[in-house]
Image (cartoon, grey):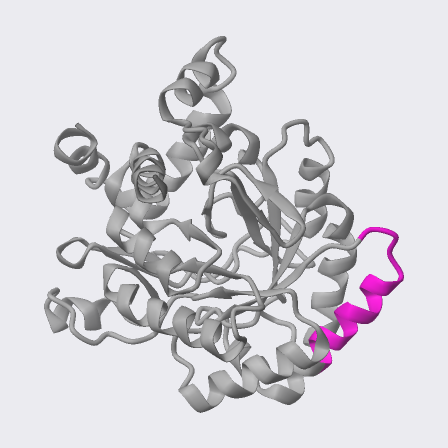
Amino acid sequence: MYEKLLRPILFLLSPEKIHSLVISFIKIGFKIPGVKWIIKKRLSVDHPSLHRSILGLEFKNPIGFAAGFDKNAEVYEDFSSFGFSFIEIGTVTPKPQSGNPKPRSFRLKKDKALINRMGFNNKGVVYATKKLKNRSGNIIIGGNIGKNTLTPNEQAIDDYLFCFKEIYDHVDYIVVNISCPNVANLRHLQDSENLSKILNTFMAERKQRSTYKPILLKVSPDLTYEQLDETITASVEVGIDGFIATNTTTSRDNLTTSSEKVTSIGNGGLSGAPLTKRSTEVIRYIHEKTLGKKPIIGVGGIMTTEDAIEKLNAGASLIQIYTGFIYSGPMFVKRINKELIKQYK
């Protein structure tokens, strides 16, 4: 029903407009008595074989919603009703920022993909923290942190540390996002020297806390294997708890969409089906290089139940979806969980 009837109607509007409408619907619609219960009853799956103990946390199933949707921590508890066991909020920055000029999000329907150059648009980490203080459910929350666009890389550590301190007590794990292609020069922070400096600062700050929160690094799919080796080595040496593989890609290889249209869209990170293979390759590589000792959250091009299983078989401990949810609809999480139950019998 979603793919044949509802999706064609929704796709008449821009991706960013649909995003705003969905957020508004959840904020308003879920206040109607019974709506949240009905959706949760319809879409949630609970089975012992789905449970995971990862990063010192207990997940009801291995499927989470990736960062970028609930940027400001406004609908995470309601959205858990769609069957997710964890939600990653953000990316949040120290100061609120509007992001890049619009339009900045585009569909490639023939490729089941999206291109976005949102640029960390968010209301700031302080706003998100206020929302997180009201947590009442048991959904696991990750906090994805970044720097403000106008902050030069030489001062980036200050931005990351500010966000880290603000959000630490209000999330279950923290994600360091230095691999997003939509913030100018951000990915220069991925070199081993800058990465070690940022992560060491976090480790020192965490030692001052009474509660241990896992720290994960989000990895770019555009790194060469030599660069991946440097990233893995630097991260493991400072004590990273795990990796998220991968972020969106700047690659435009093997697209069905015409080159004219892709060129007219311009810069941005590509997600969806064209990223499936590369994301899985990076997951498998990290898994092998770390001898399976570092948990990996697999994300990137999970468009089918088969894609989800492939990511887990490649070494992912958990998975996240975003673009696949947009193209496949609200039943997607349930379908994956049902298939996983069959696999584990």
Which residue is farthest top?
Answer: 33
Is 327 rendered above or below residue 36?
Answer: below
| Residue 285 visible here | yes
Task: Report if residue 255 lies within the magenta region.
Answer: no
At 25% from the left edge and 44% from the top edge, which residue is drawn? 327
| Residue 152 visible here | no
Is 279 rendered above or below residue 47?
Answer: below
Task: Report if residue 200 lies within the magenta region.
Answer: yes
Viewer-side residue, 225 vs 164: 225
Is 102 rendered above or below residue 259?
Answer: above
Residue 1 picture location, percent across and down: 17, 27
Viewer-side residue, 173 vs 188: 173
Viewer-side residue, 332 vs 122: 332
Is 140 rendered above or below residue 189?
Answer: above
At 54% from the left edge and 76% from the top edge, which residue is drawn? 290
Q: Report the side of 336 relative to 183 (left or right).
A: left
Viewer-side residue, 28 vs 187: 187
Location of the C terminus by quadrant is top left
Residue 35 picture location, percent across and down: 44, 14
Residues shaded magenta: 197-211
At 36% from the left edge and 20% from the top edge, which residue is drawn? 42
Q: Quadrant of residue 127?
A: top right
* Type of secondary structure dominating the magenta stretch: helix
Q: Quadrant of residue 217?
A: bottom right
Residue 30 picture location, percent across and down: 48, 19
At 50% from the left edge and 8% from the top edge, which residue is drawn? 33
Number of marks present in the image shown: 0
Q: Report the side of 265 relative to 121 (left or right).
A: left
Residue 74 picture location, percent across and down: 57, 36
Q: Quadrant of residue 226?
A: bottom left
